[in-house]
């Protein structure tokens, strides 16, 4: 009897572990860590911004690389109020001529700036 309980317990732990792993995998594939330039580039800048914000763009904002973005003077580390990158999407001014970004994407930009723009 003891032995049976032991097996049930082990089985339970094992299957819980497995489903957690599976869930991790699902959430990771659609949601890479958001506080990185790479996540923003793939999920926000590439689909919504770089058409108008490539290197040398007349508007002076390059969103095609982290360096270009930081050189464009639109991010003040840890300060959303002084980061026009955040202000422009939070107010819906950007993306120009398109609908406002989703709350999730705006929050991801905020988190990135508040994390020191890694
Ligand atoms: C259709 C072209 C276009 C698209 C798409 C676009 N922008 Fe802009 N952006 C501009 C222009 C033009 C300016 C220059 C200022 C202006 O005309 O409003 C600008 C200016 C900016 C500025 C400078 C600060 C400011 O508010 O003027 C930031 C930051 C910015 N854009 C971020 C973005 C982000 C982030 C996206 C994508 C979510 C985006 N833009 C999409 C055309 C665009």
Image (tube, helix red, strand yellow):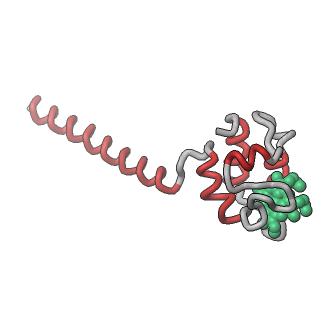
Residue 66 horizontal/vertical position (percent): 68, 47
Residue situated in front as seen by the camera: 2 or 46: 46
Ligand 1 positioned in quadrant: bottom right
Residue situated in front as seen by the camera: 63 or 108: 63
Determine which quarter of the picture holds residue 6.
Answer: top left
Residue situated in front as seen by the camera: 90 or 13: 90
In the rendered image of this protein, does residue 82 appear above or below residue 60? above
Residue 92: tell me if it is visible: no
Direction from residue 64 to residue 56 in the image, left or right: right
Q: Residue at x 68, y 42 (%)?
A: 112
Direction from residue 110 to residue 13 in the image, left or right: left
Direction from residue 52 to residue 14 in the image, left or right: left
Q: Residue at x 81, y 48 (%)?
A: 72
In the rendered image of this protein, does residue 48 appear above or below residue 110? below
Q: Residue at x 76, y 55 (%)?
A: 62
Q: How many marks?
A: 0
Residue 31: tell me if it is visible: yes
In the rendered image of this protein, does residue 85 appear above or below residue 10? below
């Amino acid at each position: 009897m003891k032995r049976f309980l032991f097996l049930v317990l082990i089985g339970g732990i094992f299957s819980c572990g497995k489903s957690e792993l599976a869930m991790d995998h699902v959430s990771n594939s659609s949601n890479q860590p958001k506080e990185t330039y790479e996540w923003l580039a793939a999920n926000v800048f590439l689909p919504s911004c770089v058409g108008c914000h490539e290197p040398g763009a007349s508007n002076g904002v390059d969103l095609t690389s982290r360096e270009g973005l930081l050189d464009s003077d639109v991010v003040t580390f840890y300060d959303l109020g002084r980061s026009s990158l955040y202000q422009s999407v939070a107010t819906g001014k950007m993306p120009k001529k398109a609908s406002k970004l989703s709350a999730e994407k705006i929050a991801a930009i905020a988190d990135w700036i508040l994390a020191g723009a890694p």
